[in-house]
Image (cartoon, rainbow, N blue to C red):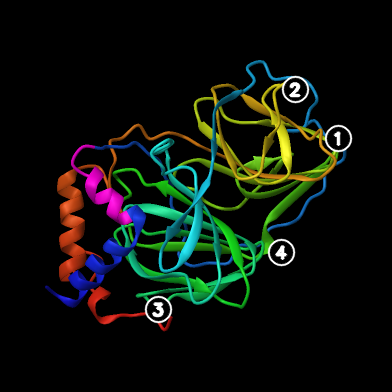
Amino acid sequence: MTTTMMRLSKHLASSPIYTSAIARIRNKTHHHNHRQLPLTQKLRTTTRTMSSSSSSAAASAPFEKPRTVLKKLLAESQPEGQGATVRRSIGRHELRNLDPFLMLDEFSVSKPAGFPDHPHRGFETVTYMLEGAFTHQDFAGHKGTIRAGDVQWMTAGRGIVHSEMPAGDGVQKGLQLWINLSSKDKMIEPRYQELQSKDISRAEEGGVEARIIAGEAFGVRSPVFTRTPTMYIDFTMRPGSQLHQPIPEGWNAFVYIVDGEGVFGREKAAPVSAHHCIVLGPGDGLSVWNKSGAPLRFALVAGQPLGEPVVQHGPFVMNSRAEIQQAMEDYYYGKNGFERASQWSSSA
């Protein structure tokens, strides 16, 4: 067994998402969607504040076809990586995937725990820091630290080996979303988009603040290029405020609540609290009310489905078992995108 094979085998044995994937690979397929990013670049945008008279996403009129809650799932803590803990919602057996989304983790990590050297192929990872900082290193020489409010949008494409480790003392918290790549894009060259907190597009209206990671809210768009059309917005709602956010019809959409509690879909619905993932039904927009006495913070994520078969083996996501077997072989023997895998290890 080569050094790379031994490293992957050890990693798969120690990671729940990888070990569970081995058992699933022969009888499970999934569907997902994705979109790619320009080569390592810093994107800068303008913060924009909208007035309450704007004829934008926060219009008070109800939607013709409002989206309601189809499924509610509490993200329960589980071990992942090396000594780390995550709250997983999408990616669990109760919600295996939501095309084009493969996984959503809310992570909470302190040194020396983290996510040491591991490979990816066939999808993108979007890491959004909520507290603290994480340092990323990969085998192509890319290295950087993302801090609270920063975003790293990484397209693994044909292959990345990297590490993600806490950059400071104390608890480091964030969200990581996996978005699938279409079959035509799975073997593209790896790329990154990175945004510092100050460069993320923002808008505010009627007691609702939006940080627009991808897509549009209140007439303000993010510059992030998503190879699969994607919306990703961090909303914070003051007590007593309401939101009416359009979502393209035909897209799958969900909400992940970070803090507080809110009423989603219908004004008379029961409130939903932090750490819940809410899958939304079809329609043209989502209405939200904060009837509590504390701020409500949540991420609204939506994407255009691919409708393609998906086979996942831990860190590799392809369209067939044969392609998964090829990905494993490529990683083991250092070829087709993994040429530098056997000679590299992170400083972490």
- The amino acid type found where label 4 is placed reads Lys
- The amino acid type found where label 1 is placed reads Gly
Q: Residue at x 82, y 48 (%)?
A: 49
Q: Which residue is the site of mark 3?
A: 141
- Closer to viewer: mark 2 or mark 4: 2
Q: Main secondary structure of the magenta part?
A: helix
Query: Where's residue 109, x and y in %?
Result: 54, 66
Compared to 263, does 194 lie above or below?
A: below
Q: CA distance from mark 4 to mark 3?
A: 25 Å
Q: Earlier in the sequence, mark 1 or mark 4?
A: 4
Compared to 197, does 2 lie above or below?
A: below
Q: CA distance from mark 2 to mark 4?
A: 34 Å
Q: Which mark is residue 198?
A: 4
Q: Residue at x 49, y 40 (%)?
A: 229
- Quadrant where the N terminus sits is bottom left
Query: Where's residue 239, x and y in %?
Result: 85, 40
Residue 233 within the magenta-colored segment of the rendering: no
Q: Which residue is the site of mark 1?
A: 240
Q: Which residue is the site of mark 2?
A: 267
For the magenta stretch, what is the residue range? Answer: 18-27
Q: CA distance from mark 1 to mark 4?
A: 27 Å
Q: Earlier in the sequence, mark 4 or mark 3?
A: 3
Q: Nearer the viewer, residue 288 or 246?
A: 288
Q: Earlier in the sequence, mark 1 or mark 3?
A: 3
Q: Residues within 10 Å of mark 2 (few under 14, many from 20)?
A: some
Q: Are marks 4 and 3 in contact (CB under 8 Å)?
A: no
